[in-house]
Amino acid sequence: MKPNGSIRRRLFFQLAGVAALLSLAFFLVVRGVAERAAEGTQDDILAASATAIAESLGEENGEIILELPYSAMSMLGTVGEDRVFYHVATSDHTLTGYTDLPPSRVAPQPGEPVFATHDYRGDEVRAVYVKRPVGVASASTDVIVTVAQTRDGLAAISRRITTTATGIGVGFFLLATALSLWAANSALAPIQRMTDSVTRRGPKDLRPVTAETPTELVPLVKELNSFMARLRSSLSQTEDFIAEAAHRVRTPLATVRAQAEVTHHKLNKPEHRDAVREMIRAIDESSRSAGQMLDHAMVTFRADSLAQDDLDLSRLIAETCDRLSPTAGLKDISISETYPEEPVNFNGDEILLQAAFLNILDNAIKYSPDDSDITVTVRVADEIELSVLDQGRGFDGADISSLTQRYNRGANVGDIVGSGLGLTIADDVARAHGGRLTFSQNQKGSGACVSLVLPR
Amino acid sequence: MRFFGIATLIATLWASVSVGFEIEEEVSYPAILESSILRVISTADRAAFEPIIDAFQAENATITVEYTIAGTTEVMAAIQDEGATYDLVISSAMDLQTKLANDGFAQSYKASGAENLPDWVTWRDQLFAFTQEPAVLVVSDQFFTPDSAPKNRAALVALLRENPETFRGKVGTYDIRRSGFGYLMATQDSRNSEAFWRLMEVMGRLDAQLYCCSGEMIQQVANGTLALAYNVLGSYAASQQGKIDGFHIIQLEDYVSVMLRTALIPTTAQNVRDAQLFIELLLQMNRRTDLVEATGLPAIDTTQFQENSALRPIRFGPGLLVFLDQMRRKTFLRNWESSLVQE
């Protein structure tokens, strides 16, 4: 499995990205609307001012007169401290005001003010043009009133709006980001819950997952459950098969061996007796090989899902020694055992550890000459060491690292029955428990020392 | 610190031929170790302004101040039409100063001193007001006891109307055709009160005397030639009160227009830095009681407006441009003349 990004992170960044886009859009819309409103306000005031001026135009003795209304000008000072310019003119001459104010490009019509933006006297000004006919209808003169104002006040309003819009936008973004984080976490919480419920299971627990499952994960959990069901059935079949195989192989072999022993006693001719002895030897070899192969299969099977039994290793070793003492007795081999005073507590798979030690001890008995000693020692230091020391032929310079390979036997064992699986089983068990198997020559004279080293 | 006190004063009376605007007086206040020259054109006379220049040089000993005095319209003409190069323009005509700023003849300066003052003290960071000067009624002791003087314009109109023989030829006011301050006050009056035109009518019928300046009016009121003078510059009247007897000052109770004396830095200024220093000093007037005392110019004081609601400060803004409109001015002067100058 290779992790490819985090859903939480992806979800968070996508949500935050959407929030950022929305904030930006919000900022632009608010600013745009507000600025247009501010501009509209300025235009309205300008138009009101120009209209007020236009309406105060009058005619006296054929001359157009204007009494510039105070309010028309003062209203322009309400928003800010903007400069104000005005111009009142007929088509051919200026009546009053700033004669150099730029004229309108579009001719205004009565009742329809025209707006324009110009550069005038070093500033940008907004200008409005209002047209009004003055005088009696037959001889009226069109007068154009222009009122212009700089846009400092507008710029100040725009700055304020921009600041506010930025503040709101940033606030919205931060809030949305925090909510995104929360949303991402909350959306992924069911996954975490399921992960926890699966993690909490023991290694042998292959029951289907029944935790509450979000709809999106139902197919995954269904597949997982079906996979576990298949695994469970496959495992139980394997277990059954091993047990069945052990029974089916060992029982007939034991029967055949017993019959061969009986026959051996009955026979008188030495060549017949030799033949039957040879047969018994072959049966022993088959029996042992079959046993070890099944042991090995079992070890392989169990190592994946190690049982966690509370064990006293001293007791375990002592039992195993007792089990093999009859075999040792046949060869007049004495087993001396040394244990620490305290129980040696260890957490591990009892069946596997027993099988491992059984194989080591069995090996030692097998390779020991008649009438020799085997020393079994349990030592607790930084690690727990279970060592078996014999007085056999030792490894005699064999490649020690290859001894634990499957079906590989030492170089000097030609005359002894063996499958080459014994130490492999021991080694596998040691590894499964986080330990190791070590080999050394017996320091005192000939013989081998095999130690099963386990962590405390 | 007054080591510049030995500086020589050079006063020059100018003939008006050399420039297109009329100068009343030009005074130089040289610094001992001169590093720069600040050229000021102002409507305030020497007596009123010298203490401020002294205070300025006390803080800035290496700046020579050249102080030119001219009338309000001449100051306007100098900057607007003649392109005269001054570093600082100080004028009592708020409307003309506003027009200069509005039309782009002033440059902006973010004065740090303005932060302690109300907003209406500055306009566009170009106009800086540093005094508030009311227009007052000055009455002669020979005609009025302090209690018998009229308290408002309606009472004044009634008094004049009922006693034409007493007051004929004995009322005075500004000739607003010649005085910028007079024109400003008259136009503000016309906005504030209908009584203004009635007053002008009555004064016109009483053969009102017209003056260019507050000084002459006060003089004539004090010696009894005039019974009263209307719209006299209050700060000037107050400063004269200690020197001349025979008159007292009345702030009418219906309203009192309050003019702000302002400074601006023209765009053509050559010594902007020193001009800004000078503006900072002017904006300290409300904390410099010594200067207020020495100049007789009342500093900005908002508490006065809270205490006396009749005080109406003239506000900066485009409204001040209205009566400067050539047509409006013509109409206004025509109305004024027809009311007051009844020949």
Image (tube, coloured by chain):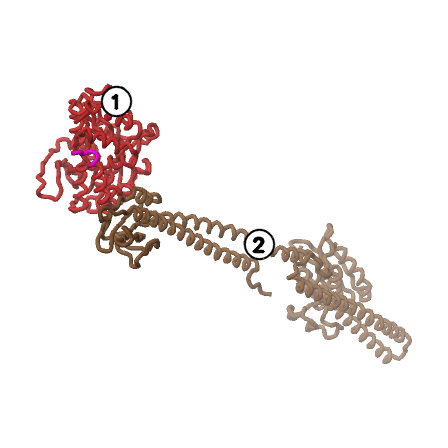
Chain colours: A brown, B red
Left or right of A16: which side holds A305? right
Q: Residue at x 8, y 42 (%)?
A: B17
Count residues near mark 1 (Cα–Cα under 10 Å), then give few for <14, some for 14-19, many for 20+.
many
Q: Quadrant of the N terminus of chain A?
A: bottom right
Residue A399 sits inside the magenta stretch: no
Query: Is the C-beta separation of discs 1 and 2 under 8 Å?
Result: no
Q: Which residues are magenta?
A: B338-343
Query: On the image, numbered disc 2 is attached to which residue?
Result: A183
Left or right of B121: which side holds A188? right
Residue B286 position (above or below residue B105)? above
Q: In this view of the protein, which residue sits in the foreground, B209 or A188?
A: B209
Please give the chain letter of the residue carrying mark 1.
Answer: B
Please give the chain letter of the residue carrying mark 2.
Answer: A
Q: Residue at x 8, y 39 (%)?
A: B15
Say whether residue B62 is visible: no
Q: Quadrant of the C terminus of chain A?
A: bottom right
Nearer the observer: mark 1 or 2; the answer is 1
Question: What label does residue A166 carry, if any?
Answer: none
- Seen as rendered, the residue at the extreme right is A266
Left or right of A120: which side holds A420? right
Query: On the image, numbered disc 1 is attached to which residue?
Result: B149
Q: CA distance from mark 1 to mark 2?
A: 82 Å
Say which amino acid is labelled 2.
Answer: Ala
Q: Residue at x 75, y 73 (%)?
A: A416
